[in-house]
Amino acid sequence: MKVNFYATLRNVVKQKSVDFDLPPGATVHQLLDEMLNQFPALRHELLDEKGNMFAHVHIFVNGRDAPFLEKALDTEIKPEDVIGVFPAVGGG
């Protein structure tokens, strides 16, 4: 499963896209767990001290923010899905 990282998260993973090997039927939450397993430094960027995803972090599946998917982070993802992980970006 190819995951695209944006903005400051690219500095953490040291590349634009990363391929993750997930079993069939994996969920967004399982993908998040695998991202943290391979890149422990992402934990500080994505999760609060209770292990909940920061509200300013967005995981998009085929252009839809994961919390707004039918099953949110428990939504099943497919290898052909387009996944993007975005931190909050400020500017003016």
Image (spheres, rainbow, N blue to C red):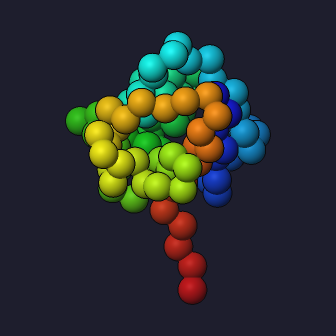
Quadrant housing residue 18: top right
- Give the left or right position of residue 33, taking residue 2 as reference: left
- Residue 91 lies, in percent from the top left, at 57, 79
Classify 87 as above or below 15: below
Determine the residue positioned at 51% across, 46% down. 61
Whether residue 81 is visible here, answered yes or no, is yes
Identify which residue, 24 or 41, lies in the foreground: 24
Q: Quadrant of the image for the N terminus?
A: top right
- Residue 73 lies, in percent from the top left, at 34, 37
Identify which residue, 60 or 81, lies in the foreground: 81
Q: How many marks?
A: 0
Whether residue 12 is visible here, answered yes or no, is no
Q: Residue furthest right?
A: 15
Classify 56 as above or below 12: below
Classify 2 as above or below 24: below
- Give the left or right position of residue 23, taking residue 27 as reference: right
Quadrant housing residue 4: top right
- Residue 46 lies, in percent from the top left, at 43, 43
Determine the residue positioned at 72% across, 39% down. 17
- Residue 25 lies, in percent from the top left, at 45, 20
Q: Quadrant of the image for the C terminus?
A: bottom right
Determine the residue positioned at 42% across, 30% down. 76
Identify which residue, 20 or 13, lies in the foreground: 20
